[in-house]
Image (cartoon, rainbow, N blue to C red):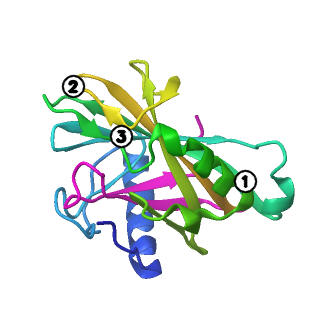
Amino acid sequence: MATNMSRRVFLKCAGAAALAVTASGIFAGCSPSGGGSKDTVYGVGESTQINGVNVKLLGYRLDPISGMVGNYAGKTFITVCIGLENQSEQTVKMGNTTETELAEVLKAIYNNQYETLGKSDFKMTSDSGKIGHAEIGYLTDETGLKSYGVRDNLKPKETGCIKIYAVVPSNWEQIGIQYTPYFAPNETRSFVLNRANKL
């Protein structure tokens, strides 16, 4: 189960991540709340494995959606992409959002009512506080960027992409992301996204 990331922990992680991403290295100094690769915060393009699934923060896109401007005054709407490559022999569940729930997700995004969606596999924060978001899983091509179809499960050897639709402060510089996968509820990984990581 995902846990909250305090502002102090985020700032500690973000500060270390900024240096590590610049140096293109793995670094220590911030422990995620779950198990797994403790004392590591991953930058864009750095892979971590969770139960045979490679997980990588790919970056973000500016994603304005027609009709939503009135709901998000003073905010920026982005889509953060998390790539998944299932190298295991088991089918894994990408998240708790299934294809049949897509309409509810879009409705929540449109109305800025993320709390109506229930549990999320992600915790997102910036130095200004918690970020509203909703995620949907897709199948992808081998790059993890071009997505097609909304899918709940990821079969062995398939690649997927979780798109996190998020509302962030217009002047954001760094975002902290904690991911506790649906398929591995006792594992948590921490990522830092910088404004320069645009796809």
Q: CA distance from mark 1 to mark 2?
A: 34 Å
Task: Give the residue type that dot 3 points to.
Answer: Lys
Kindly identify the residue that appears in the image at 84 percent across and 54 percent down.
Answer: 69
Q: CA distance from mark 3 to mark 2?
A: 17 Å
Q: Quadrant of the N terminus?
A: bottom left
- Residue 110's label in the rendered image is 1
In x, y percent, where is residue 52? 16, 37
**What's the magenta region?**
171-199
Task: Give the residue type that dot 2 points to.
Answer: Pro
* Helix, strand or loop under label 2: loop
Kindly identify the residue that appears in the image at 24 percent across and 62 percent down.
Answer: 28
As rendered, which of 15 and 42 lies closer to the eye?
42
Q: Find out whether residue 175 is within the magenta segment.
A: yes
Q: CA distance from mark 3 to mark 1?
A: 27 Å
Which residue is tagged 3? Answer: 56
* Helix, strand or loop under label 3: strand
Is 155 displayed left or right of 74 in the figure?
left
Kindly identify the residue that appears in the image at 83 percent across and 63 percent down.
Answer: 73
Number of numbered discs: 3
Which residue is tagged 2? Answer: 156
Q: Is residue 131 visible?
A: no
Farthest residue to the left: give it: 89
Relative vertical location of residue 173 with respect to residue 53 in this rendering, above or below: below
Nearer the observer: mark 3 or 1; the answer is 1
As rendered, which of 140 and 58 lies closer to the eye?
140
In x, y percent, where is residue 38? 19, 62
- Asked if disc 3 and disc 2 are in contact, CB closer than 8 Å, the reply is no
Task: Give the residue type that dot 1 points to.
Answer: Tyr
